[in-house]
Amino acid sequence: MSTRPPLARLGLDTGKKARLHRILHQHGLRNGTALFLPYDQGFEHGPRDFFANPGASDPKYVTRLALEGGFNGIVLQVGLAEKFYWDFAGELPLVLKLNGKTDIPSDHAALSPVHADVADAVRLGADAVGYTLYVGTPAQEQDFAQYRQVRVDAERLGMPLIVWAYPRGAAVEAKGGKNSFYAVDYAARVASELGADMVKVNFPHPDKQDDVPEQYRAPVTAQEAVDAVVRSANRTMVLISGGAKAGDDAMVEKARQSMEAGATGLIFGRNVWQRDHDDSLRFVERLREVLTKYDSAP
Amino acid sequence: MSTRPPLARLGLDTGKKARLHRILHQHGLRNGTALFLPYDQGFEHGPRDFFANPGASDPKYVTRLALEGGFNGIVLQVGLAEKFYWDFAGELPLVLKLNGKTDIPSDHAALSPVHADVADAVRLGADAVGYTLYVGTPAQEQDFAQYRQVRVDAERLGMPLIVWAYPRGAAVEAKGGKNSFYAVDYAARVASELGADMVKVNFPHPDKQDDVPEQYRAPVTAQEAVDAVVRSANRTMVLISGGAKAGDDAMVEKARQSMEAGATGLIFGRNVWQRDHDDSLRFVERLREVLTKYDSAP
Amino acid sequence: MSTRPPLARLGLDTGKKARLHRILHQHGLRNGTALFLPYDQGFEHGPRDFFANPGASDPKYVTRLALEGGFNGIVLQVGLAEKFYWDFAGELPLVLKLNGKTDIPSDHAALSPVHADVADAVRLGADAVGYTLYVGTPAQEQDFAQYRQVRVDAERLGMPLIVWAYPRGAAVEAKGGKNSFYAVDYAARVASELGADMVKVNFPHPDKQDDVPEQYRAPVTAQEAVDAVVRSANRTMVLISGGAKAGDDAMVEKARQSMEAGATGLIFGRNVWQRDHDDSLRFVERLREVLTKYDSAP
Amino acid sequence: MSTRPPLARLGLDTGKKARLHRILHQHGLRNGTALFLPYDQGFEHGPRDFFANPGASDPKYVTRLALEGGFNGIVLQVGLAEKFYWDFAGELPLVLKLNGKTDIPSDHAALSPVHADVADAVRLGADAVGYTLYVGTPAQEQDFAQYRQVRVDAERLGMPLIVWAYPRGAAVEAKGGKNSFYAVDYAARVASELGADMVKVNFPHPDKQDDVPEQYRAPVTAQEAVDAVVRSANRTMVLISGGAKAGDDAMVEKARQSMEAGATGLIFGRNVWQRDHDDSLRFVERLREVLTKYDSAP
Amino acid sequence: MSTRPPLARLGLDTGKKARLHRILHQHGLRNGTALFLPYDQGFEHGPRDFFANPGASDPKYVTRLALEGGFNGIVLQVGLAEKFYWDFAGELPLVLKLNGKTDIPSDHAALSPVHADVADAVRLGADAVGYTLYVGTPAQEQDFAQYRQVRVDAERLGMPLIVWAYPRGAAVEAKGGKNSFYAVDYAARVASELGADMVKVNFPHPDKQDDVPEQYRAPVTAQEAVDAVVRSANRTMVLISGGAKAGDDAMVEKARQSMEAGATGLIFGRNVWQRDHDDSLRFVERLREVLTKYDSAP
């Protein structure tokens, strides 16, 4: 088991430390771990994601669920933040997602356009911002350019920056795909090299080895893979993404392995709200049982 | 029947609330519903739309018709607004349409260029601005970029933002087309996630299922589809578009279903003015009879 | 009796005409006259103005009074507008007062600093802005400089500009004082020459003749004086101020003379709210009886 | 016969009205009609246009011709305006053409780049600016973007804006071509929707019906077509272009039909100066005989 | 007893509401009341204030005291915030005091220059900013000008603005002095009219009546005076200042009267840290006992 370093050892300036302290030690389990609820799938995938539980189409329902479930924060696009966060302002940390796109046109040169800036996040009382970086996309020059502005603004305003580090593009597909150990490990490192305070990655699949660089072809366990990913991220805290809804036991086991590796927390959306209300809270409770074992000092 | 929330519950700032109050409670039926007259078809389709009733080519005739018909507002491009709105200034709310294009070149990478900004709308005494967002277009990066500027300016100046959320582009055509339930539902959600105050959509067609995501292949009624669209839009008020001229009874029934779903109103152009003056007013009267049953408090 | 020209004949651009139409023809008596409630005395004079009726200290009470009394608008400083106007947004026109000062330091070189700009008024959904110009102050260079910016912004954004034209300073005191016919007449003209859309002046006192220029020493009636003031203002509409609370009959007679002279309306604060609620409304009703006789077409 | 509205009824601001009054009522026939001499063919087509009358290659010759012929203005690109207009400054109104291109590369994605701005026109004492808009071009996004800047500057500076509304591009060629009634009618409307003060169009050819929208396939006379075009332009004044040199009687008849339809005037270049000096003036005299019958009040 | 309105009824935007929720409901007694520790006396008065308890000269000692005492926030100038707040970031809300001055030169035209801006407060993770406004100073034009920038930035960034509303200047001294009921009441109102979210005032002394306006010469109790001050502040929350160290029982009684009047809380510095550590905490405990009785809902 890796040891998560306390906030005070992560090279953070005052504002980022203040806001991360709030997220990690004044909300959720208040033990230095994090459980985030992302809620931008209506934009990224469309309302089809709500068909399993139509009530989840309502941002008020989902925000209240985040509050009831003891989450450390909810992730919203600017439009929903402006119309819904006032009702909960200050009760639950807000992560303002700064970019996003629909999944309608092709993903071959994926780029996620910016819809809001760090000053919007400040204005809305958010405690962090989120940015999707498509690691490996042919559009990486535009991606890095807009990311750079976000990073610089986040530093100037003391706002923690969470990077959704997503491998994407034809070259990624040709070398193991977007969830391979190779791709996830690389994505985590890129976020760290470019100054993310937290990085959201998918759980790495070490068995996806087709055409990955040879170093990633040795047999490693899932635990070893996620250990390596957290190590690649170094002082950038790691959040493991739930992704599409899957079996509860498998998800909980991945959560456990992630935390064992030294991750700071989890970011689970569809696995949480694509079921009825009480079932959502029961599943969240299982995740919290995992997190409670991995506390760290401020 | 869904309940439309009052203006005071939509997360609006002072200026947007003031202007929407004016539109919804001091014009038209003054009962919280809306009936808008769009009049930019001469630009979007060309004067051919006026051949059925040549008098409709005259912006003064159409604006007066909006006043006589008790509409909640008229939608104009900047050129017509500058030359004609002075005559009616303050008598009828103006929605300044900020972008637009001709239908002469191909639509495969549709983008609607901006012709005026929110400050122009302020200067002209408009009570809202309109922006066409082509959801799904390969040009979404440019579209989102120019939309973002409009949204930010609209917030800064307290100007309500109505998004024409139109699915467009090859990928849309390949998955059910622009009027499918899938496409309309997605478009309504995107407008909401990106901060529209109102969204104008076409009536959804649940039978258009070719190659739509599997969630949209179950048999649903028209009423269920429009219910879902309004739900996807959440605190973004929904306006149902009339589209090309069709049978009156069918249009009135769609209007009724839309309002039953919780829409705020209708935006009907060609169905109104592509007939003679008295016939126009008779048809408007039928729409008003529908709207009168769906009042909501301020 | 002078004839007030309709809005369409005042050389107004579209936005100003739209907003003035709203104020003059969609609120109050809807007959082209105006009755405004100014409520910045807590700033200009301090809370002592509320001692006669402590409830008037509450901006919500006074705003509701303006609504109940059928006023054409309420005048607020930016702080009260931001915290209180949302509740009434769109129901009652807002005039945002852009400058103001306390009466604590000496008035010998009076200047009223700017606290908000025209864009703030737009953002808050105001239908006009107010600016106090101290005609005759030794500080007139600074006063004119900040006024100029307000005028330019008001034109750019189509926002009606109401000038509180107040004679002030040692030279004014030495020539008949701030309420002399000479001083009020000059102040009205200055506002007109500098582009005000409306000008608020005190009722002129033709008997205050000490050391006024000789042209103002001929005996004229109060009616002749106010006739001249309105004529000096030409296409700048005139609002006559109530000033400190005085006898009701005298105030109503001044109101009548003002309207007879061609003024557009009245702006009465302390005379209205420095008494109990029902008495306030009774007095307002007397003013409305006057205004109802002086309607004009849009 | 349509009635041309006077300048005072066109929704113009002060500066535009002042300059158009000068053009229409203090030059030419001084009766509200216009006859412009365009002289940018050396740029648009090259010097081949001067081979029929080599003297016409000299800007001084052509400008003097405009003065002798009693034109309401001459249209020049910035280079000729800077070197030749000084000689005639104030004697003859100048229309500064702000964009232009050679006809050497293909026209399939036609775009006319901007060479000067509205402030240049002010500096040179021009009374109007001209802009070529290629309606239907695949490059419409760039075209609209640069046009927008011109429109905004023209409004800010009170400068009348004349739009050369030219249908262009593959889609136009595929639907009746650039002189079809369909294309000319659409182009006139686009100029009006986007705020042109005058629009220059070619005379419409209702017989060009191949693949035009069905509304344009009914048999109409030339007179009916030009009537419709003027109606589509509404408060945007219409100038009918002469185009390539043709038979005098045919040109005069087109001029008569245009004026009968309510056009404001004519813009004839090659038909005027592609012949010797005296013959030019004789032809101009025939055009003036037409215009003299269509006077309108200021 | 007045009823303090909940945060949701104060006309606050999202960011201000979020930060005030944090201060009032996630720190201190978490019951909607506030107890702030101001610590800028070393700047305003010099180190002489620390002589009673030399340990209080150490910002770390005082910040820890604020944490131990369960304060809702500590107030620091930018220099101390930059060097000391990192240690406590997020554990205790920071109020960044944006302006300040020494007491060495005369106070006759008092003005407190700005040392940091709202963006600095954001960068340091502060939850509010403080600004000293010298109500009545002859320098009010400069004071209002720099205040205006602070207010605008605070709105743009959603940062709560606490105004230290201090009557100052010769005119104030000539009319009852800076702690008179008249002066304190006026100061509270000015802060409210100019958009403060909270206002810090001294406890009003109704017996200081020399040359105050006649309305303030009637005999009123201390309770009636502080009631009036809170009423004058309306939706601007009131903090009562402790001022110079005085008897504990008297201070606690003033605290009780203030809360009874509807104040939101207290801001006590010297009374707290001008004694030894344990005695400080004992006194704080007495203040908390008062505050605990005046809870309000979020």
Image (cartoon, coloured by chain):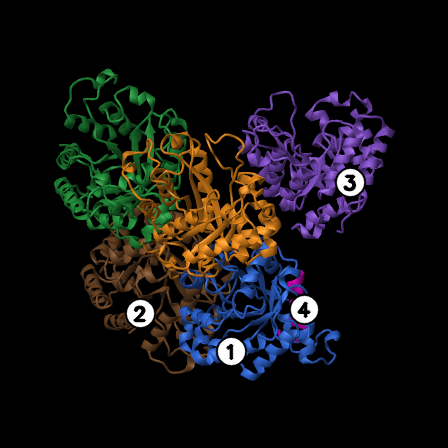
Chain colours: A green, B orange, C blue, D purple, E brown
Residue range of the region highlighted in magenta in the rendering: C178-193
Disc 1 and disc 4 on one polypeptide chain: yes
Image coordinates for residue A265, horizontal then vertical, percent: 20, 38
Tell me the distance, in whole angstroms, between the alpha carbons under discs 2 and 1.
35 Å
Looking at the rendered structure, which numbered label has been put on residue C186?
A: 4
Q: Residue at x 61, y 28 (%)?
A: D177
Q: Name the kind of residue labelled 4 in the image.
A: Tyr
Residue designated by label 2 = E262
| In the depicted structure, whether residue B111 falls above or below residue C99 | above
Image coordinates for residue D175, horizontal then vertical, percent: 57, 29
Q: Categorize mark 3 by other alpha carbons within 10 Å: few (<14), some (14-19), many (20+).
A: many
Left or right for E231, reference A204: right
| In the depicted structure, whether residue C190 falls above or below residue E215 | above
What is the chain identity of the residue bearing mark 4? C
Total count of labels: 4
What is the chain identity of the residue bearing mark 3? D
